[in-house]
């Protein structure tokens, strides 16, 4: 073996592939370094590149130690760039080569390679090895059907021993290590000997595989023959009785259909389908499809309806028995029952209960069904994104079924159930269609008397169904779908309501569920309030029920360990004993006043929250920084607040150019939680003014409202939840927009006890209330600002005036 001169080559590491000399191979190159190496070879490397195999195919950027030293010097025949950025390249192996050292290159692998050249060996031993290998390879080709006969013809014409060994090795399914070993053997005779050993091993493996396949095939043929004969015998035995059984089945379907008071269109369709079924062979696949179609018609409640209750007193008793509070939805149901008792027949209403999790939307729908004497059925729409889930598949598809609406009506067994469409705001859409668009027909009282399911392909009357949908928020529901529903909001429960719900429902339910009913176990009011205030933070009562269940489990364990009859009284100290350290601090009102810190009010999917806003002013060049993971709308509110402060600089006692020498930073804590919306505008403005004047704001005050550049205070949403949050936080005074006065009637009067509500239509009013010591000479109207103050006690007695007027 002779070594030629050393040369530098761009190097391309290969995965699971060894390239031999004289071998033409197509490669798909995707790694960036490899692509750059190819381009370098094409541009200035004489279209020559060095290929060597990686020891670990998983390595994306193999180190020098992970690349075999012996490889192949190859010429690039053709290179084609593909649309996805990869390159398809055809290469031809030229000579063996050994890497002497790697050279550093920033873009690709570069190596110094010794070119290895074989010497001719024409001994008798080599001639004998060549003949033996050709014979063995011919046997291998006969066993391995993947290799074409043309390959054997080209191999037979090769007389050179080294080239023959390389050509055969390229066609064998050997391990990478074995192929690499053949590449590294420089002696022709030794390489031929090694190749014969590997070839004989592969032939032996192929023969064993052939024997195994033959045995399995014979066993399968035997079992298939037995199965075929058994089926033939069964068919012969049933030949006479099969037709009679099929006809009896058709007659039974016909009797069931006659009992159904279906529409004329449906009756005509069934007449044609039954006639078609009678003419079919009972064993045909089409007969099964037609029979299933008729079965669906026979199973649907076309005119079967439950007797509805019109006793309003009984309905009211059931609703009050199942749920505490929820006055508005209960009134709407009682109104519907009253109108129906007068009219006799009324189209079912389409109600949408919107509220945070755990306020009782789903359970209220069950209570409505019980109060009105209807059956109840529930369909969860969370994650539904296929229009066919609602309207079904056409019968042309294999395994087609009606949509979920028809399937659940079959389950309800009546045409006038309470149908709950749960989580209607969680639907999505993709290439298969938009399910919310399919619901437009279902939830439209003017259209759903002729709902057309794709599978049934006839009109079905849904007008007697009472549809109730539930959602956590409205923004996830398409506007056309909202337009078809009557929205009833179920806001969060007050602390008093949660206490009553726990006493009347949750405690007794969990005691019974955990086998503690009948035992002397008492949850005190203070213990339940402790659970509500310090162990849960929610608008509903779901987590409250979980905490009560957790205490019950620990009590059950105590009773099992020490089964003595004893009374247990759960007090606040017991709660901490069973549940550990409280995760929440009750209320967020600070005890001390701080400059630049103001209590804001926010609405979330889980109810209202106190949202502290902080501002600080520092020497700078007029930069406004707003942080706290705020959305675009909230950041724009901060900019509008600063613009208002600049416009009132003179009245505030600030220099006209104060903003040019100061940097202002507004931060809303709990920065990991996303926040957005315009209702923090006045809060940010007061926070900026406090920071600039270096005067603190009252800590017993909270506020909410959108600000304009002229200082107007615009109305906001979620007022009830925000007032409840202020009540929980022991806030004494709340500033709200003047136009939100109408929303105060929705709030329980008990919440206002000891609380003062200030109705403001301009920022001057907000400033006077928040910082009484800051005297404004004139408002933007040229007159002293005016507050409209609602004293808390005025909500406790209807005969008292709703509000007083007080001027500052």
Image: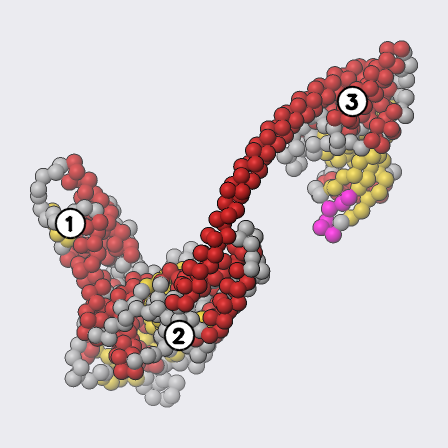
Q: Which residue is mark 3?
A: 139
Within-10-Å neighbours for mark 2: few <14, some 14–19, many 20+: many
What is the total number of numbered labels drawn onto the structure image?
A: 3
For residue 632, side relative to residue 534 (left or right): right
- Foreground: 429 or 101? 429
Q: In front of the other: label 1 or label 3?
A: 3
Q: Which residue is mark 1?
A: 517
Q: Quadrant of residue 524?
A: bottom left
Q: Residue at x 77, y 26 (%)?
A: 142
Q: Residue at x 73, y 21 (%)?
A: 203
First along the sequence among labels 2 and 1: 2
Does the magenta portion include 776?
no
Does the magenta portion include 86?
yes
Q: Quadrant of residue 377?
A: bottom left
Find residue 22 and name its label: none
Question: Which quadrant, please, contains the N terminus?
Answer: top right
- Magenta stretch: give its range: 83-88
Alpha carbon of mark 2 to alpha carbon of mark 3: how far? 77 Å
- Foreground: 295 or 32? 295
Q: Position of residue 321 (x, y in %)?
A: 20, 65
Residue 207 shows up from this direction: yes
For residue 264, side relative to residue 704 (left or right): right
Q: Residue at x 47, y 70 (%)?
A: 266
Relative vertical location of residue 129 with respect to residue 652 in this rendering, above or below:
above
Chief SS of the magenta region = loop
For residue 160, side relative to residue 565 (left or right): right
Alpha carbon of mark 1 to alpha carbon of mark 3: how far? 83 Å
Q: Secondary structure at mark 1?
A: loop
């Amino acid at each position: 073996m002779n070594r030629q001169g050393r040369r530098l080559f761009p190097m391309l590491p290969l995965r699971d592939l060894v390239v031999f000399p004289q071998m033409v191979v197509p490669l798909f190159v995707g790694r960036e370094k490899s692509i750059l190496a190819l381009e370098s070879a094409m541009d200035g490397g004489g279209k020559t590149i060095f290929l060597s195999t990686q020891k670990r195919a998983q390595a994306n950027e193999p180190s020098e130690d992970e690349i075999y030293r012996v490889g192949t010097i190859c010429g690039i025949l053709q290179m084609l760039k593909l649309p996805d950025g990869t390159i398809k390249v055809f290469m031809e192996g030229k000579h063996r080569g050994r890497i002497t050292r790697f050279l550093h290159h920033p873009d690709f692998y570069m190596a110094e390679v010794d070119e290895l050249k074989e010497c001719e060996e024409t001994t008798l031993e080599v001639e004998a090895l060549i003949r033996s290998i050709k014979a063995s390879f011919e046997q291998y080709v006969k066993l391995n059907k993947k290799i074409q006969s043309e390959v054997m013809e080209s191999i037979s014409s090769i007389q050179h021993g080294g080239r023959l060994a390389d050509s055969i090795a390229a066609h064998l399914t050997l391990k990478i290590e074995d192929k690499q070993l053949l590449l590294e053997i420089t002696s022709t005779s030794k390489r031929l000997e090694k190749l014969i050993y590997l070839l004989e091993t592969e032939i032996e493996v192929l023969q064993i595989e052939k024997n195994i396949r033959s045995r399995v095939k014979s066993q399968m043929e035997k079992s298939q023959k037995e199965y075929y004969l058994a089926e033939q015998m069964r068919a012969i035995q049933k030949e006479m009785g099969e037709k009679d059984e099929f006809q009896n089945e058709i007659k039974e379907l016909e009797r069931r259909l006659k009992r159904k008071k279906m529409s004329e269109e449906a009756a005509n369709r069934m007449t044609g389908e039954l006639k078609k079924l009678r003419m079919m062979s009972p064993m045909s696949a089409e007969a099964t499809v037609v029979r299933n179609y008729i079965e669906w018609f026979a199973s649907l409640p076309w005119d079967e309806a439950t007797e509805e209750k019109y006793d309003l007193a009984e309905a009211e008793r059931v609703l009050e028995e199942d749920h505490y509070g929820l006055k508005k939805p209960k009134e709407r149901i009682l109104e519907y029952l009253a109108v129906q008792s007068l009219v006799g027949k009324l189209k079912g209403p389409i109600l949408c209960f919107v509220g945070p999790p755990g306020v009782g939307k789903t359970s209220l729908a069950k209570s409505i069904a019980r109060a009105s004497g209807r059956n109840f059925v529930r369909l969860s729409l969370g994650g539904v994104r296929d229009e066919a889930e609602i309207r079904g598949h056409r019968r042309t598809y294999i395994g087609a079924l009606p949509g979920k609406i028809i399937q659940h009506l079959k389950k309800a067994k009546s045409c006038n159930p309470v149908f709950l469409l749960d989580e209607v705001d969680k639907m999505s859409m993709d290439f298969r269609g938009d399910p919310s668009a399919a619901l437009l027909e279902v939830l439209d009282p003017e259209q759903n008397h002729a709902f057309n399911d794709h599978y049934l392909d006839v009109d079905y009357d849904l007008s007697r169904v009472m549809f109730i949908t539930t959602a956590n928020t409205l923004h996830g529901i398409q506007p056309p779908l909202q337009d078809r529903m009557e929205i009833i909001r179920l806001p969060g429960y007050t602390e008093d309501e949660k206490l009553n719900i726990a006493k009347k429902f949750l405690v007794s339910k969990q005691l019974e569920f955990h086998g503690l009913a009948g035992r002397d176990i008492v949850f005190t009011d203070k213990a339940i309030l402790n659970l509500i205030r310090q162990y849960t933070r929610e608008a509903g009562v779901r987590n409250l029920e979980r905490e009560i269940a957790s205490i019950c489990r620990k009590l059950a364990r105590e009773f099992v360990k020490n089964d003595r009859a004893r009374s247990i009284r759960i007090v606040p100290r017991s709660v901490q004993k069973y549940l550990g350290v409280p995760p929440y601090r009750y209320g967020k009102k600070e005890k001390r006043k701080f400059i630049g810190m103001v209590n804001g009010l926010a609405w979330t999917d889980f109810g209202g929250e106190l949202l502290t806003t902080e501002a600080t002013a520092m020497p700078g060049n007029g930069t406004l920084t707003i942080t706290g993971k705020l959305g675009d709308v909230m950041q724009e509110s901060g900019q509008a607040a600063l613009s208002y402060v600049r416009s009132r600089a003179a009245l505030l006692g600030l220099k006209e150019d104060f903003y040019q020498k100061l940097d202002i930073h507004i931060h809303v804590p709990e920065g990991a939680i996303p926040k957005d919306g315009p209702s923090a505008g006045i809060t940010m403005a007061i926070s900026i003014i406090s920071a600039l004047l270096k005067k603190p704001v009252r800590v017993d005050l909270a506020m909410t409202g959108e600000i304009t550049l002229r200082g107007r205070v615009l109305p906001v949403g979620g007022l009830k939840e925000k007032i409840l949050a202020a009540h929980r936080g022991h806030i004494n005074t709340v500033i709200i927009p003047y136009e939100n006065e109408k929303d105060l009637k929705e709030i329980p009067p008990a919440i206002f006890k000891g609380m003062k509500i200030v109705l403001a239509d301009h920022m001057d009013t907000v400033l006077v209330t928040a910082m009484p010591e800051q005297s404004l000479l004139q408002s933007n109207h040229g007159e002293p600002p005016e507050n409209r103050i609602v004293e808390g006690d005025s909500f406790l007695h209807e005969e008292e005036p709703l509000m007083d007027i007080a001027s500052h």
